[in-house]
Image (tube, helix red, strand yellow):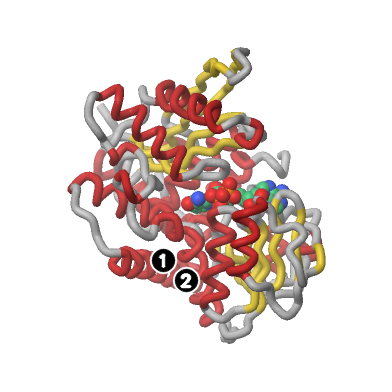
Amino acid sequence: MAENNAYQNALAQYDKAVAHLKLKRGIAEYLRYPKRELTVNFPVKLDGGDVKIFTGYRVHHSTTLGPTKGGIRFHHDVTLDEVRALAMWMTWKCSLMGLPYGGAKGGVIVDPKTLSANELETLTRRYATEISILMNPKGDVPAPDVGTTPQIMAWIMDTYSMHQGFSLPAVVTGKPVEIGGSLGRIEATGRGVMFAAREAMKQINLPIENATVAVQGFGNVGSIAARAAHEMEMKVVAVTDVSGGVYNPNGLDIPALIGRFNDNRSVVGFPSADSISNDELLALKVDVLIPAALENQITSANASAVKCRVLAEGANGPTTPEADDILNDKGIFIIPDILCNGGGVVVSYLEWVQDLQSFFWEEDEINKQLERHVVNAFKRVLGEAQQRNIDNRTAAQVLAIRRVAEALMIRGIYP
Ligand code: NAD
């Protein structure tokens, strides 16, 4: 098995969890596969007049618990297998967080940094049109992921609404607040990561004040998690992005780093810090390590070098099954992705509910609900892990898969 195939990794995790459940063979088999997959090849007129063909995907893994939910990724390495894995993880994440959603994911093979603003808008609107045979407010609701932003969500909402003839903000979440987005959505995933990290630290009696933190990836999830850690009086000592990273053992000035990032689009060269590579960051002796970039960052090749106490998976699928075994043997407390970054989809759900009822809540209310969902899910995962004497990831998947399988049995196999 190729260790860097995210879908194979998702299946390996699934099979490991299913071994602890007494599912009928057909049900276990059914939930291994995506329900439906759409591949779209579509033209985009570039600023210079040329036409370029792009490929995108939208995969629905399961609709058992409700409409499908899952982000859209714009990245040059997107593959159908990656989107399948991310869709499957969304099913388990929504289930674990107690939401009435199935899982989906979308992606376009594109490096958005190579496009002008006009080209990015055109590509987004055409992709939204292509996937609108699957996407709709009652059936499939996308959200941001790597390489996509609130502005891109706004273009998707506008495109879909133009085709319908009236505004349907609930077709997508992670929108700007001005057009039906939720307060607290931009921050939700990173905040949720730190709620989960805080619970893990309490669990292993690790003091929060001055705890050292390293963050890989400084996008939506990584930068907000770093800011939340800073606000909780932890010491963020290292941060990397795709171009490199910065390290200061006494702690980085995170608000200043965010300010610089907003101007330069990179953390590299931040004053009063040394430079650090991604490999070095992952091997730092820190209390909390937060991978918040892409899949397969911690593998059998580097897992034995990882020295954190808590691994808080901001990214989806950052740790391969082979690496999992190594980290578990080392006694590292892993907060698995579907729990750790589940705060994002919780607030996406709250955004969708607000849009459907056209009634909006204060940020305080949103943040309380976010914290409640993450802390409750954390406690359930820990309880399941302790009761069955299994690792946290398997426990999270056992809980998530069981809820979907039970719903499937109650609904019955159609026809
Ligand atoms: P983003 O595009 O905002 O940021 C990604 C960051 O990762 C960027 O800073 C980029 O420079 C960095 N990066 C990319 N490749 C890297 C590498 N090889 N080494 C170091 N850094 C690298 O994306 P995001 O929304 O923050 O998503 C990050 C991860 O979190 C993904 O796995 C995504 O699926 C997951 N996630 C996102 C959300 C959300 O609400 N946005 C919710 C749940 C999970």
Res 264 visible: yes
Residue denoted by label 2? 195
Q: What's the mark number on residue 374?
A: 1
What crowding class fits label 1: few (fewer than 14 Cα within 10 Å), some (14-19), or many (20 or more)? many
Badge 1 amino acid: Val
Q: Nearer the viewer, residue 130 or 384?
A: 130
Asked if residue 303 lies left or right of residue 337, the reply is right
Q: Secondary structure at mark 2?
A: helix
Q: Is mark 2 within 8 Å of ligand 1?
A: no
Residue at (50, 68) in percent of width and height: 385
Residue 116's x, y, as percent?
59, 30
Closest to the observer, 252 or 118: 118
Q: Which circle's residue, 1 or 2, is located before the other in the chain?
A: 2
Tag 1 near tag 2, CB within 8 Å: yes
Residue displayed at 41% across by 71% down? 375
Task: Judge whether 258 appears above or below 199 on screen.
Answer: above
How dense is the environment of label 2, judged by Cα within 10 Å: few (below 14), some, or many (20 and up)? many
**Residue plotted at (61% across, 16% down):** 52
Q: In the image, 122: left or right of 137?
A: right
Confirm whether residue 16 shows in the render: no
194 on left or right of 404: right
